[in-house]
Amino acid sequence: MVTAESTVDLLVVGAGTAGLAAAVEAAARGLTVTVVEQADQVGGTLWRSWAQMSAGGTELQRSRGIEDNPDLHFDDVMRISKQTADPKLVRLAVDHAPVTIDWLMSAGFDMDPDAPAILYFHEPYSLPRTYWGRRGGRSVLEVLVPRFDQARDVGALTAHLSTTMTELLVDGADRVAGIAVVDAAGRRREVRADHVLLTTGGYAGNATLFPELTEGAPLVGPGAPTSTGSGISAALAVGASTRGGDLFLPTYGGVLLRDSESTTIPLDDFPQLTPQSRQPWEIHVNRRGQRFVAEDSASVDVRETALLDQPGLEFWVVYDQAARVKAPPLLPSYDEDHLVEMFEDHPSFCTADTVEGLADLAGIDPDGLAATVAAYNSGVESGADAWGRTHLPLPIAQPPYYAVRNHGTTLKSPAGLVVDDQLRVVGARGPLSNLYAAGEVLGGSTLSGKSFVSGMSVTPALSFGRLIARRVAGVEKGTT
Ligand SMILES: Cc1cc2nc3c(=O)[nH]c(=O)nc-3n(C[C@H](O)[C@H](O)[C@H](O)COP(=O)(O)OP(=O)(O)OC[C@H]3O[C@@H](n4cnc5c(N)ncnc54)[C@H](O)[C@@H]3O)c2cc1C
């Protein structure tokens, strides 16, 4: 059955980070708003994201005596991204970022008392500029969802949950008329709108689409299952194009779920491989049993880039009983009983009484691993490591030996839709005048390049969603 609704000012497709922010702002500006969300709840990736945000020039920084501004933020983003991020969109993002953080604060955001800070999970900023809530993405939801619900309750917006956009409906050469959706009962409907905003997120939950859009790179990660990439596919079908698939860089480490070849354990449970948080007592080896980087390199970009060249984008963290007993926990969220269970029956956790036996079990070349362990141990003894590592606490010499298989993982998908500087999707013949995009659908690499820049996904998703709503309101109602 095909039915049509009356036309609304703004149709928001996807109610995650960017979509919720856009819908709330648009409703507050007096637009008629319809929101379509495929899941049976709003929130998207915010349910699992750390939602670390970044902005230069906030009230909070000023109150702490931190002198920062969007220009310094811009320079840092371009430095960390090695000039591979899109400078125009980075400029737009950093200019709006402080307003977004100030807005969250004025809305009662539960900011962690340690924020803002310089964090080291990604290549660090030069100033304390990263912010996060005490409950990660859930703290952001605690601001957005009540405002969304309230707007819906007073009739300022209409939300259709469990309703999936299947296609964009074109209206001449440079416009869209709306979208086609399918609801939970399988009914097809058309929703008409003057403006359509794609906030459908990325494709880090779609192991089939991931290599297609990312030059064959495999998907391994903790991405949300709702990150299907269907917004990108729908836009491609009406002449849009993607960019950034060549800018894939894996995040360093992460362990697969027991029964999956693409989904990892939650990010909070990943092994602690950031030297600024925990110095390594282990070595990291590839399938050939060879080390490929100084495990204590202060630069995560150096470690991630080295991992990019390893076969299968996988590596094993190898250690012995002495490290197990003496080192700070490698997997801090697992207690001893849980760890014993993992070594008993999880395929990524192996233990054996000899180095060669460990290699056999793990699928590493035994001769390669034995030679690497011997070379590492003589470096520990002499104090001169072949890879320049300086943290050399103990040789790997006391059985049993352990290996934990890790992967180059994906938190956000790199490729996304090409947009112009007004965030309008660019089609085969130029920008589509009323089709906008915000959030990860723009591509994770657009604002981070071939790198990871702290907070450069969630903050711009919120900022761009709100900005587009205001622009549409300005066009439609004469407000700014
Ligand atoms: C574990 C993890 C940690 C992260 N940590 C950080 C961090 O600390 N800082 C940071 O900046 N970024 C982080 N990220 C990335 C960041 O969270 C995301 O890029 C961002 O939240 C994406 O927001 P979005 O609005 O674009 O998409 P989402 O929040 O994913 O929302 C998209 C919504 O669209 C819906 N949708 C999709 N297709 C359709 C369709 N066809 N029809 C209807 N609805 C549809 C989805 O169901 C979903 O609700 C992290 C990601 C992960 C997975």
Image: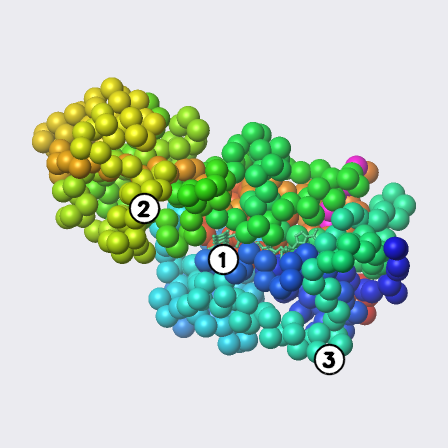
Residue 322, quarter of the rendered image:
top left
Provide the secondary structure element on which disc 2 rests: helix
Q: Is residue 468 visible?
A: no
Point out the tag, 2 or 1, that comes first from the N-terminus: 1
Q: For residue 426: magenta?
A: yes
Point out the tag, 1 or 3, that comes first from the N-terminus: 1
User: Where does residue 25 sit, x and y in percent of width and height?
Assistant: 67, 69
Of residue 261 and residue 106, the one placed in the foreground of this image is 261
Numbered tag placed on residue 80 in the rendering: none
Looking at the rendered image, the disc whose residue lies closer to the viewer, 2 or 1, is 2
Of residue 388 and residue 17, the one placed in the foreground of this image is 17
| Circle 2 residue | 342
State how far apart marks 1 and 3 are (Cα): 29 Å
Identify residue type, mark 2: Met
| Circle 3 residue | 154
Q: Residues within 10 Å of mark 2 (few under 14, many from 20)?
A: some
Task: Identify which residue is drawn at 73% across, 50% down.
Answer: 424
Query: Magenta segment, principal secondary structure?
Result: strand
In this rendering, is residue 202 above or below 297? below
Q: Is mark 3 within 8 Å of ligand 1?
A: no
Q: Residues within 10 Å of mark 3 (few under 14, many from 20)?
A: few
Q: Residues within 10 Å of mark 1 (few under 14, many from 20)?
A: some
State how far apart marks 2 and 1 are (Cα): 23 Å
The region drawn magenta spans: 424-428
Of residue 274 and residue 263, the one placed in the foreground of this image is 263
In this rendering, is residue 223 above or below 366? below
The furthest residue to the front? 345
| Circle 1 residue | 48
